[in-house]
Image (spheres, grey):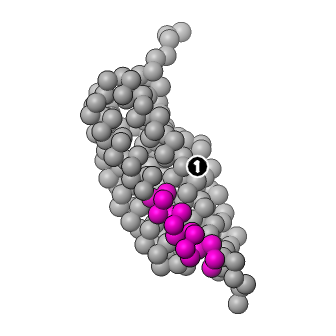
Amino acid sequence: MATKTLEDLFHETLKDIYYAERKILKALPKMARGAQDEKLKAAFQQHKEETEGQVERLQQVFEIIGKRPRAKTCPAIDGIVEEGEEIMEEFKGSPALDAGLLAAAQAVEHYEISRYGTLRAWAQQLGYKDAVKLLDETLAEESKTDEALTKLAEKAVNAAAQKQAA
């Protein structure tokens, strides 16, 4: 059996996050439609646009390493997205719906931040300077989105979730 290298691990993880981003692209419009708070809807719509750019950057990273863009099923993101769908079903019409959607979105962001941070470090180690720049750009966007979601939760969504259903 051939020894697996950091380069192999980088490529496999890149395929994982490529799958995840494409899955997220499909989930964000559903989350935007399900959200009740207008600012949360807008945040989901804005992040969809950002995610499209992130997919394009991932395709560039594949090119940098001489591989064609290919996705590998990511059970972690499948599970996180499934939880978000369950929240939309179970809490539909509830004051707590948006808080649940926001929490699911932050779970996605934290997963992405973890993956992009790791990929960035490995790209640095492997000498993929151009990939480092692309991954850094996406990591910064994901962190900014997470911060924006936290502020939205603290300023409005969590308080609205606490209200009694009319």
The one of 163 and 56 positioned closer to us in this rendering: 163
Horizontal side of residue 92 vs 115, given as left or right: right
Q: Is residue 104 above or below residue 13?
A: below
Out of 130 and 21, give the one closest to the viewer.
130
Left or right: residue 101 versus residue 59 is right
Amino acid type shown at disc 1: Asp
Main secondary structure of the magenta stretch: helix
Q: Residue 20 versus residue 107: which sits nearer the camera?
A: 107
Left or right: where does residue 148 sit relative to residue 63?
right
Q: Is residue 82 visible?
A: yes
Identify the magenta region: 145-160
Give x and y (percent) for residue 67. Answer: 32, 29
Q: Is residue 50 toward the left or the right of residue 3 in the image?
A: left
Q: Is residue 63 visible?
A: no
Q: Quadrant of residue 132?
A: top left
Measuring 45% from the left and 52% from the top, which residue is drawn there? 143
Magenta residue check for 7: no
Q: Which residue lies most toward the right here?
A: 164
Image x and y of residue 1, in percent: 53, 9
Q: Position of residue 27 (x, y in %)?
A: 50, 60
